[in-house]
Amino acid sequence: MLAKEMPIIDEASKTVYEVTAEEHARQLLKARQDQIRCENDAKLYKERLEKRCAEAEQAYEEVKAENEELKRKLEELLKNK
């Protein structure tokens, strides 16, 4: 209830309301900090994942090129037999 609806509020009740509001504010702040931390962790994870994908693609292309070279050499050897 609002203070306007209850003009008489004893000090104990007021303190309870204030403590509850402070605790609620702390919980909201902690939740926001946790959200920011999670967002930052997600960004780092995404960057690492993208880097690993790029490295894997590069390694794949290198192996593919090496396989093509070996295939070409094998075909030459088979022709010369």
Image (cartoon, rainbow, N blue to C red):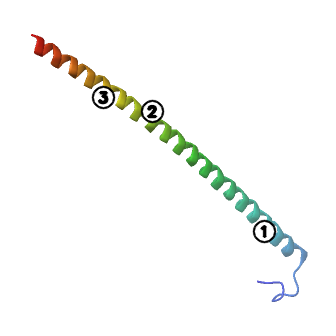
24 relative to 73 in the view: left or right? right
Say what amino acid the circle numbered 3 marks.
Lys
- The residues bearing labels 3 and 2 have C-alpha atoms spaced at a distance of 14 Å
Q: Nearer the observer, disc 3 or disc 2?
A: 3
Residue 73 lies, with reference to residue 17, above or below; the image says: above
| The quarter of the displayed image where residue 77 is located | top left
Which residue shows up at 56% across the image and 48% down it? 42
Q: Which residue is mark 2?
A: 55
Counting other residues with Cα less than 10 Å from the Cα at mark 1, is it few (<14), some (14-19), or many (20 or more)?
A: few
Q: Could you tell me if the residues under marks 1 and 3 are in contact, i.e. CB atoms within 8 Å?
A: no
Residue ranking furthest to the top? 81
Q: Residues within 10 Å of mark 2 (few under 14, many from 20)?
A: few
Q: Secondary structure at mark 2?
A: helix
From this view, report whether residue 60 is shown above or below residue 22: above
| Residue bearing mark 1 | 21
Please name the amino acid that badge 1 sits on.
Answer: Ala
Tell me the quadrant of the picture where the N terminus can be found.
Answer: bottom right
Foreground mark, 1 or 3, reads 3
> Residue at horizontal 83%, vertical 87%?
6
Q: Image quadrant for the C terminus?
A: top left
For the residue labelled by badge 1, is the local secondary structure a helix, a strand or a loop? helix
User: Which residue lies under the disc numbered 3?
Assistant: 64
In x, y percent, where is residue 28? Answer: 71, 62
Which callout, 2 or 1, points to the residue nearer the camera?
A: 2
75 horizontally vs 33: left or right: left
